[in-house]
Image (cartoon, rainbow, N blue to C red):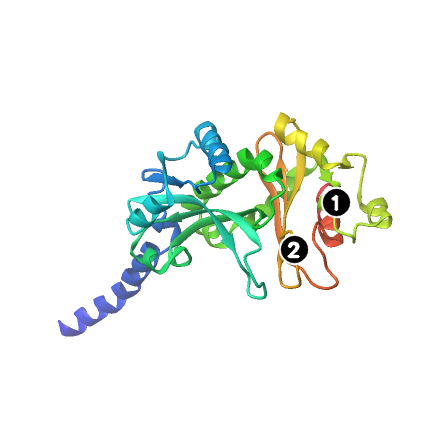
Amino acid sequence: MKRILILIAAVLLPVFAAAQAQINTKKVKIGDFTQKVTKVVLTGNMFYDSSLEDEIVARWRVSPYEFCTLPEFEQLKGSDEYYFLLTTKGQFKKESEPGLQFLTLVKGGKKAQGGIDDMLEVVSLPIASAEDPSGRENIFFPAFLDIIQNYALESMEKDASAYTGLSNNSLNLPKIKGLTMVFSEGDLSTEITDLVKDLNFDENMLITDEDTADRHISDETDGTVVSYVAVPSEATPGSYCYKMLIDSRSHELYYFKKHRITKKTGAGFLAEDIRRISSARR
């Protein structure tokens, strides 16, 4: 009998271990996202908060939401009954100060006492320079909110998405075939020379001024994809540049990639990005 019990335990132990591993996955931890209240944290900046409130009311659809102040966030962040959408600033290892502003969705919990970095992060989307935002982020705000919501829902279904992050959206790149690509001229790095353009751009890959590019987002132009770059206003070697391609109507994120700024590599879409995008269109 003792031998039989030992054999049964040996057989069941991997099953119990697998069940425990499943319980601890990120997908399971955020599985209650749509049932819990998302607290949208206001910054205290009247202009920014007004825009944030308007867009949340118009766009937030995946969970109940309420607005709260920073002091209220500090009081509530230890509760796992809430998720929090807040504006954060990120500083990378070689930066002397935070260079980028992010929209970050996190889950409350006991670890929150250690700060936002210790909270369970659902997603963090870079949206602008931390110190000197251009204002372009306000035009893209509806798209940013849709990207965050879509990613959160996908992460509830797939652990691969939950752990890979937004870069997994680059798998959507083949979908751009047949769509009109609109690059804001300021989103292109100095690597995008006339030769790079001649070799990679087609008649439906356009380079325009910023206002013209952004108008496609404002107007939700059908069949159009628009470029967006988030980079510190005073980018130095060690800073990061994030590049995105966003559908102007559906706000689907087709491309999300970052690179480190170096003495040789500046901000904006690099030649390798353009080659990859061009190849996906063929």
- Of the residues shown, which amino acid type is indicated by label 2? Glu
In the rendered image, residue 116, in percent from the top left (x then y), is placed at 40, 55
In the rendered image, residue 66, in percent from the top left (x then y), is placed at 35, 35
Reading the image, the residue beneath label 1 is 278
Q: Is residue 178 visible?
A: no
| Disc 1 packing (10 Å; few <14; some 14–19; many ≥20) | some
- Disc marking residue 254: none
Reading the image, the residue beneath label 2 is 234
- Of the residues shown, which amino acid type is indicated by label 1? Ser
Quarter of the rendering containing residue 245: top right
Nearer the camera: disc 2 or disc 1: 2
Q: Quadrant of the N terminus?
A: bottom left
Q: Nearer the viewer, residue 230 or 131?
A: 131
Q: Is residue 183 above or below residue 265?
A: above
Q: Is residue 5 above or below residue 99?
A: below
Q: Nearer the viewer, residue 172 or 34?
A: 34
User: Furthest residue to the left?
Assistant: 1
For the point 76% across and 53% down, the residue is 271
Q: Quadrant of the C terminus?
A: top right
User: Furthest residue to the bottom?
Assistant: 3
Q: SS of the residue at dot 2? A: loop
In the rendered image, residue 51, in percent from the top left (x then y), is placed at 50, 33
Q: Is residue 202 visible?
A: yes
Q: Is residue 217 above or below residue 3?
A: above
For the point 51% across and 35% down, the residue is 47
Left or right: 209 as drawn, with respect to 111? right
In the rendered image, residue 157, in percent from the top left (x then y), is placed at 42, 44
For the point 38% across and 59% down, the residue is 118
